[in-house]
């Protein structure tokens, strides 16, 4: 298998939540969030072509080729990984676009980290099922139709959307959000706001508490000591007063959490629109050891993209993260090899080369690690072979579940190779003292 890196992003600032009319909720929720996704073209290849492509990729990914650069930037993460906190779990946050939102390759990383260093639970998850492409393999969420999703790319809002840049808002009684999960500690994260409404919190349909979101503007938290086993946690609004939810934290007392915070269609600059005060508070609350930033696919196809603007955006994001999380390691993950059809021909995304090189430069200049996803796939043009092998989808942009799992395993192996070197060098240094 091949390997990959890990990184994350964040931003915010405080203001009262805007009113959301019933008409707006119905129009946006039903027409934009509930519509069927575009169909991905099916690419038909012969069994011989598929087998040849699959064998070529398997041989390439089995070679000892690491595409993780600047691994020294991960030393603070490795330190925490080798000496985990005696109480509390160790957190990894991954921000990104649809590749992250689907949770496919991130879930492979989650399983690998938790198998080696202990299962800390799901960690932070978005509330309910806020948009069609959102998924978590380690928990299940749902919500009634009266909630308004804020923060998605097609809808600009005030940026007060919590750790993941996504929120749910309701302004009517009887609206519900559920989370089905197993954990030892549970938290609800929400917006505290003047005139905020109350929600009933239930466990397996049994009411436990009433959470009041009224108060001075800022992030609020409700904590619950979970009992063993899988439970369904439910929130129900009690009036027409506004309620805005940021997400849940479901974790164990020890182990690693790998928390995926992806938004379909997102570019990295979306993070700069998030309310800094709220985001900073939420980031410090999670206190991640590693932040993974996995953007670049949408930038590579954007008509308004410029090298200067992209360089400034990435640099600004990393500087803001450093100011809030001075001890955390940051890993930039480049976009995969991807292409689109232009005048009947399959062409690479126009800015893909530049996006990757700017990410590499920004990572080097700002003390971050960089993992070249495209190189892990085989370099420019390799996506065609991945599609032929059944590891890439027919849009030549996204991978299949098997392809994402292979990439996730490759990244984990690359990170662990460097971690093992770190452990060996530290042991050697201790022995020589």
Image (cartoon, grey):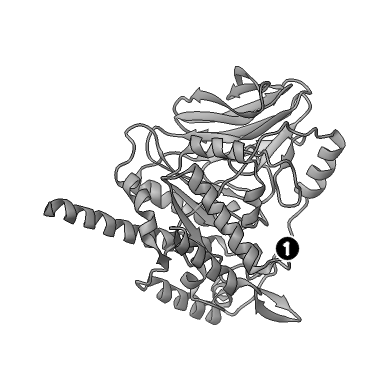
Q: Position of 29 compared to 281: left or right?
A: right
The one nearer the camera, 149 or 309, is 309
Side of 165 relative to 35 (left or right): left
In the picture, which quadrant includes the N terminus?
bottom left
**Residue at 40% across, 52% down:** 112
Closer to the camera in the image, 217 or 119 = 217
Residue drawn at (78%, 28%) of the image: 171
**Quick check: 342 above or below 239?**
below
Regarding residue 213, the answer to whether it shows in the image is: yes
Residue 108 at x, y = what percent? 46, 54
Where 364 sits versus 290, above or below? below
Q: Relative to residue 216, is residue 295 depicted above or below?
A: below
Is residue 34 visible in the rendered structure shown here? no
- Name the side, left or right, on which 72 lies relative to 206: left
Give the percent coordinates (x, y) of residue 203.
57, 24
**Front residue (pair 371, 391):** 371
Q: Which residue is mark 1?
A: 39
Q: Residue furthest left?
A: 432
């Amino acid at each position: 298998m091949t390997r990959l890196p890990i990184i994350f992003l964040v931003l915010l600032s405080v203001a009262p939540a805007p009113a959301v009319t019933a008409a707006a909720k119905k129009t946006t929720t039903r027409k934009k969030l509930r519509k069927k996704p575009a169909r991905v073209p099916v690419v038909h290849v012969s069994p011989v072509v598929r087998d040849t492509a699959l064998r070529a990729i398997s041989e390439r990914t089995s070679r000892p080729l690491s595409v993780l650069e600047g691994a020294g930037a991960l030393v603070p993460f490795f330190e925490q990984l080798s000496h985990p906190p005696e109480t509390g779990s160790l957190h990894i946050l991954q921000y990104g676009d649809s590749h992250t939102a689907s949770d496919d390759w991130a879930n492979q990383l989650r399983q690998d980290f938790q198998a080696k260093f202990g299962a800390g639970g799901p960690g932070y998850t978005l509330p309910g099922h806020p948009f069609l492409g959102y998924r978590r393999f380690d928990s299940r969420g749902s919500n009634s139709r009266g909630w308004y999703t804020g923060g998605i790319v097609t809808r600009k809002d005030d940026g007060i959307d919590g750790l993941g840049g996504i929120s749910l808002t309701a302004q009517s009684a009887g609206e519900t959000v559920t989370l089905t999960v197993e954990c030892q500690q549970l938290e609800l994260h929400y917006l505290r706001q003047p005139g905020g409404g109350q929600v009933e919190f239930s466990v397996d349909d049994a009411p436990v508490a009433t959470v009041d979101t009224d108060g001075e503007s800022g992030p609020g938290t409700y904590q619950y000591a979970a009992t063993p086993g899988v439970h369904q946690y439910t929130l129900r609004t009690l009036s027409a007063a506004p309620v805005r939810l940021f997400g849940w934290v479901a974790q164990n007392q020890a182990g690693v959490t790998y928390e995926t915070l992806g938004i379909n269609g997102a570019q990295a600059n979306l993070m700069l629109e998030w309310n800094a005060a709220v985001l900073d508070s939420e980031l410090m609350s999670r206190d991640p050891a590693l932040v993974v930033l996995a953007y670049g696919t949408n930038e590579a196809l954007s008509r308004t993209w410029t090298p200067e603007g992209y360089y400034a955006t990435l640099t600004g994001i990393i500087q803001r993260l450093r100011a809030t999380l001075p001890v955390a390691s940051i890993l930039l993950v480049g976009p995969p090899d991807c292409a689109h059809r232009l005048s009947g021909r399959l062409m690479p995304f126009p800015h893909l080369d530049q996006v990757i090189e700017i990410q590499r430069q920004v990572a080097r200049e700002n003390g971050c690690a960089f993992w070249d996803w495209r190189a892990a796939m085989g370099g420019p043009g390799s996506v065609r072979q991945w599609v032929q092998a059944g590891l890439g989808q027919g849009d030549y942009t996204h991978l299949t579940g098997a392809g994402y799992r292979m990439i996730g395993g490759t990244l984990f192996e690359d990170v662990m190779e460097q971690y093992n070197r770190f452990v060996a060098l530290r042991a050697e240094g201790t022995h020589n003292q």
